[in-house]
Image: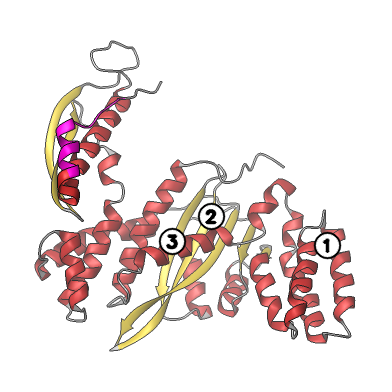
Amino acid sequence: MTYQMNYTLPTELLEQIAAEGLEALPELIRIVINTAMKAERQQYLRVGPYERSAERQDYANGYKDKTVTTRVGDITFAIPQVRQGQFYPGALEKGLRSEQALTLTLAEMYVQGVSTRKVARITEQLCGHAVSSTQVSRATAQLDESLKAWRERALGECPYLYFDALYIPVRQAGQVRDAAVFIAVGLTSAGKRVILGLSVSLSEAEVHWRQFMQSLLQRGLRGVRLIISDAHPGLKAARQAVFGGLPWQRCQFHLQQNAQAYVTRLEQQPEVAADIRAIFNARDRAEADSLLAQTVSKYAQTASKLADWLETSIPEGLTVFAFPESHRRRLRTANGLERLNREVRRRVRVVSIFPNEAACLRLVTALLMEISDDWETGKIYLNLSLT
């Protein structure tokens, strides 16, 4: 049973917003969040106000004030309470981890003396007040503990496993370098996507990828049937060392892009792309192999390097044909992980250059925690019961 609460903003508040613009935003946020928390408590109680029901699991017990620092300043919310004390509204906490991590990252840049005036202004806008080194140290320790616990949490069965990396500028020893952020996404037995882990390193060398993959196994990852990724040398070598006995699906999207490096004539690119697409869209592996042989023969004389590349590389993108047809659309590429990477880049862009690897790891972890929570409570990504 779902309980709903209707709420209309007071006319005086609407008039205040119209007159003051953003100055009235804190009050609007306070009312909206308070209303959401009250509705959430009602949902938790499983009974409406003044109603009697056998489904009731607790009783409302007033409110407790809590002041939260937000991007628009300090706001005091009324936290709904219950008698047995087993309820806390997720409406307030959602998104606070990433906002706190962003605030700490910018503040850390300021404290370490590597920030600009612009960063200092952004920090004050986010915090609503100046941030001291003592405040940063205390808050950082608390946040890092929870983020580390999430990165090291126990894992379970994930039939399908995706790997990818993105690069984020980090300052090291007075120089700005691109740090590689390794990300692993799994598809659980329930068909939900989950972010399994991440790691930050200053290169995509095999040793770093291998350490990251081994850490997933040490945390209990099991039941993997297929790995989907691109063919980066470091990733590929680490995968063979750690998951050597498992099938590998090379991302078909990346294969399409890689093929263009072997096409010498610009006008030939659409034709080559169409030929490769026909192979990937074949009904089964036998038809795909037949189309591949025809395509290799087609370009053997006019583009021998392309033909050689097609013959050796395209089969790495055909592993998906050994899996149920209903699963293939989700398994043929790592595009879902690519979209995740774009979202991370968009949200860390305000920082520009991280002062160190720890600051980068802190903010990206908080963002991925938030996204993974949304995935796990959202719709099924792939129905594994369909074969």
Task: Identify the secondary structure beneath mark 3.
Answer: helix
Q: Position of residue 373 (x, y in %)?
A: 40, 48
Q: Which residue is mark 2?
A: 186
- Percent x, y for residue 11? 18, 31
Three-letter amino acid code at the position of disc 2: Gly
Report the mark closest to the observer, 1 or 2.
Answer: 1
Query: Can you see residue 250?
Result: no
The alpha-carbon separation of the residues under discs 2 and 3 comes to 18 Å
Q: Which mark is residue 343?
A: 3
- Kindly check if marks 2 and 3 are in contact, taking CB atoms under 8 A apart as contact: no
- On the image, the x and y values in percent for residue 321 come to 76, 56
Whether 207 is drawn above or below 344: the answer is below
Q: How many marks?
A: 3
Foreground of the two, 241 or 112: 112
Which residue extends farthest top?
52
Tag nearer the camera, 2 or 3:
3
Q: Which mark is residue 288?
A: 1
Labels 1 and 3: the sequence-earlier one:
1
Determine which quarter of the picture holds residue 2.
top left
Q: Is residue 304 above or below residue 358?
A: below
| In-image side of 386 versus 375 (left or right) | right
Span colored in magenta: 5-18
